[in-house]
């Protein structure tokens, strides 16, 4: 038995975050969505994703009994409902398929997710549904994801002791430190939600943190940082300055002063010193965000929406990003003034002019950056990044 986590027609709507990963590899809380499915179901998981990603993110090696929308957070009720599916049944909510009980060799088509075939037996799901369909949903749903992951990972376990040099506002039982975590001389507020500190992670002295908050393994919050929850920083991240309701998927740096709000950064990103983003328009109107799926700006429906940045993208010192700015994979952004609201992947420059960044130089930089965290850029990583470069330079949407 195993579970296939399908992009389910969502891949193109979650770009640039999904240029380099399947939808289920997003990390809105402590765990990746796929990790949550594995832990909660006890079954191996694999991916049905874009062809160019399928070698790096494969289907399960064991026969699959269920195919699930990879953009769904695995709540206990949803996991139980999926596990109860039989072959030829489809779990639905408001007319959209959530999961299929696999029957023979049948593979759900992209259209089957939005309009499930009539010959399948429909099972209506009545529980809580947390869905990630657009990039901004990652920070929107971050707080709920942290709370559920925190409950899952800490159930029946005892936190490492919290130093008495810290100030706790709220219930200290909502703070969990994994082995090797260091938190000294900080103020931790759990009234808004739990605080989770991963293995060998460090929160330096003077930091102010309000939950819900998650810090991944070996990650670091720098001295005097001000973190407003819900926020989640994945493994090996380095974060300083002021951050509000933002998610760093992992291995990314916002190590200096500057504001980051209502934003999502992929992996291996770096924000230069005093990089700031706007998350609220002066008109207080809804923020529009560039959509790779349509090629146009899309109304997010949000009053607060900041920066969406793909993997390996970087900003120079004093860079300013406007509300709803989208930066593609491996873009290198710098220059005075507010940057364009959409900066394609593998760009070099900014408001003062943009040229195409040489792919070989970009890959060389990626390799050096990853080696600093003792991670190798694999041949599969290289192939994926080259494919993304080709897609961006062709100016076309991901095929579907």
Image: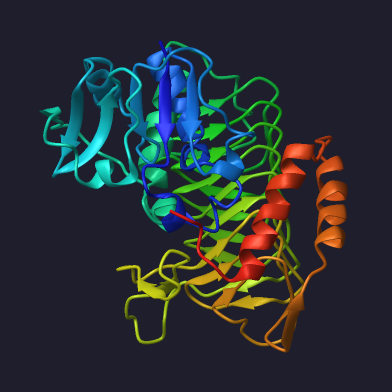
Q: x%, y% of residue 211?
A: 45, 43
Q: Position of residue 356 (x, y in %)?
A: 75, 74
Asked whether, in this view, residue 369 is left or right of residue 306, the answer is: right
| Image quadrant where residue 371 sits | top right
Task: Assign the N terminus to one quadrant of the image.
Answer: top left
Q: Position of residue 205 (x, y in %)?
A: 70, 45
Relative to 143, say whether 340 is above or below. Answer: below
Residue drawn 49% across the image and 68% down it: 306
Nearest the eye: 137 or 228:
137
Residue in view at x 77 percent, y 73 percent: 317
Image quadrant assignment for residue 71: top left
Q: Is residue 359 above or below residue 137?
A: below
Q: Is residue 245 visible?
A: no
Q: Residue at x 81, y 44 (%)?
A: 370
Residue situated in front as seen by the camera: 128 or 392 = 392
In the displayed structure, would residue 186 be above or below residue 289?
above
Find residue 91 and report its horizontal and vertical position in percent.
20, 30
Name the foreground residue: 14 vs 318.
14
Q: Is 43 left or right of 350, judged from the image as shown?
A: left
Residue at image position (68%, 33%) is 201
């Amino acid at each position: 038995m195993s579970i296939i986590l399908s992009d389910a027609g969502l891949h193109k709507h979650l770009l640039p975050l999904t240029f380099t990963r399947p939808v289920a590899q997003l990390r809105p809380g402590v765990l990746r969505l796929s990790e949550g499915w594995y832990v909660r179901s006890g079954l191996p998981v694999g991916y049905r994703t874009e062809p160019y990603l399928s070698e790096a993110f494969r289907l399960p090696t064991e026969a699959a009994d269920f195919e699930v929308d990879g953009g769904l957070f695995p709540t206990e009720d949803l996991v139980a409902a999926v596990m109860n599916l039989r072959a030829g049944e489809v779990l639905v909510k408001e007319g959209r398929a959530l999961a299929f009980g696999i029957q023979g060799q049948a593979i759900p088509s992209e259209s089957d997710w939005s309009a499930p075939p009539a010959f399948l037996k429909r099972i209506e799901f009545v529980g809580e549904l947390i869905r990630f369909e657009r990039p901004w949903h990652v920070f929107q749903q971050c707080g709920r994801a942290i709370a559920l992951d925190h409950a899952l990972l800490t159930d029946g376990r005892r936190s490492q002791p919290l130093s008495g040099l810290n100030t706790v506002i709220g219930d200290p039982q909502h703070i969990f430190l994994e082995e090797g975590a260091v938190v000294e001389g900080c103020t931790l507020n759990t009234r808004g939600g739990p605080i989770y500190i991963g293995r060998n992670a460090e929160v330096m002295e003077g930091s102010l943190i309000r939950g819900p908050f998650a810090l991944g393994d070996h990650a670091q919050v720098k001295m005097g940082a001000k973190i407003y929850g819900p926020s989640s920083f994945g493994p090996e991240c380095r974060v300083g300055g002021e951050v509000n309701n933002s998610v760093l998927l992992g291995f990314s740096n916002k190590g200096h002063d500057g504001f980051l709000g209502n934003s999502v950064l992929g992996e291996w990103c770096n924000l230069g010193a005093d990089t700031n983003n706007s998350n609220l328009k002066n008109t207080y109107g809804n923020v529009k965000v560039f959509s790779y799926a349509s090629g146009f700006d899309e109304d997010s429906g949000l009053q607060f929406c900041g920066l969406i940045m793909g993997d390996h993208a970087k900003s120079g010192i004093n860079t300013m990003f406007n509300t709803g700015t989208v930066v593609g994979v491996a873009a290198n952004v710098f220059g005075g003034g507010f940057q364009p609201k959409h900066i394609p992947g593998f760009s070099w420059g900014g408001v003062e002019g943009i040229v195409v960044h040489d792919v070989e130089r970009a890959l060389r930089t990626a390799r050096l950056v990853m080696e600093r965290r003792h991670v190798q850029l694999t041949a599969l990583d290289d192939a994926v990044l080259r494919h993304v470069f080709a897609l961006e330079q062709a100016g076309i949407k991901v095929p579907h």
